[in-house]
Amino acid sequence: MANSDPDKLISKADKLTKLSMTRWSADWKSATVLYEQAANAYRLAKNYEKAKEAFEKASKGQEMLSSPWDAAKHMESAAVLAKEAGNWKEVSEFSRHASELYTECGRSQPASDALAKGARALEDVAPEEAIQLYTDACDALEEDGKEQMAFDLYRAATSVYIKLEKYADAATFLLRWALSADKCNATHSQCKAYLSAIIVYLYAHDFQQAEKCYNDCCQVEAFLNSDQNRAASRLLSAYTEGDVEEIKRAAQSSIISNLDHVIIKLARKLPTGDVSAFKMDAKDQEEPLDEDDLT
């Protein structure tokens, strides 16, 4: 059977799943074996479109046989083949369906992995959808209390946001990462995520938001006593002084050099605009001297 024409295998399998005057019930068990054989034969022949369709049918067969795990595996194979065929919409659809099937098995890790694989395939061609898949992959792990397993996903989503120049969204996702890190007592990762968010705001030349973010982060004791806090404080002080050279020196610090590569690249380009206005604003905010107050 392994050497049979895959077209004939599909035809035979299709007949086994259709009801007729002589067939009162579908034989999904036999049909699914044939679909799987055909899918592998098509894949070997690099006929990606037909292989994809065969794996879809094999997945449906495993679902009908109450085997969601095997159905999910076939759906993941279909997603890979959809990528080879350049069908990006199906990459997303199949990845999501595979994830749902793994969830049905009570397996959050492979459910998340299925979404992440789809996201990686879509990063360059459909970055917005890739971000959504990464976000859903994080959700799957967070809902199961496995935040630490999502760290690479936060990193990947942040990187795509930055490529899209959606800096506010990137910073928001970094703060979400920090919150998850806090839940699993990953203090170092938490502090790095906070510092990264502040750098992203500075790169977007939004000093006000960077300062607000810093003040909020300082409410967290772990960050308040960290090296990352000192690095952020040095950067912000340089901005309020309007000191371009000090900003550049602060951005070269060893603490910032230990952040993720995409954040280091942003830090090395600071400042991204005129910082003299920040110095003027800082002066304006200083309390004027009251000559009548001699105390």
Image (tube, rainbow, N blue to C red):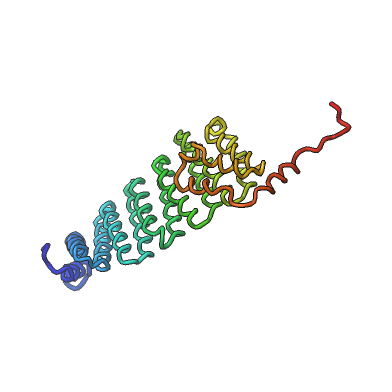
Residue at 56% in and 40% down: 249
Outermost residue on the front side: it is 245
172 vs 211, left or right, is: left
**Residue 164 percent coordinates (x, y):** 49, 58
Identify the residue at horizontal 28%, vertical 51% (top origin). 69
Is residue 48 at least partly visible in the picture? yes
Nearest to the observer: residue 30 or residue 169: 169
Q: Nearer the viewer, residue 2 or 22?
A: 2
Q: Residue furthest top?
A: 295
Task: Name the residue located 35 percent from the left edge and 54 percent from the top edge.
Answer: 117
Number of marks in picture: 0
Residue 206 position, x and y percent, is 62, 50
State the image coordinates of residue 257 (x, y, percent, origin top left).
47, 40
Relative placement, left or right, of 265 versus 51 is right
Q: Residue at (29%, 53%) from the top-left corner?
A: 68
Q: Quadrant of the N terminus?
A: bottom left
The image shows residue 162 at horizontal and vertical percentages of 49, 53
Q: Which of the two residues, 171 or 245, is positioned nearer the viewer here?
A: 245
Nearest to the observer: residue 270 or residue 125:
270
Quarter of the C terminus within the rendering: top right
The residue most toward the right is 292
Position of residue 52 relative to residue 119, above or below, is: below
Asked whether residue 201 appears in the rendered view, the answer is no
Q: Is residue 189 left or right of residue 7?
A: right
Q: Residue 198 is drawn in which quadrant? A: top right
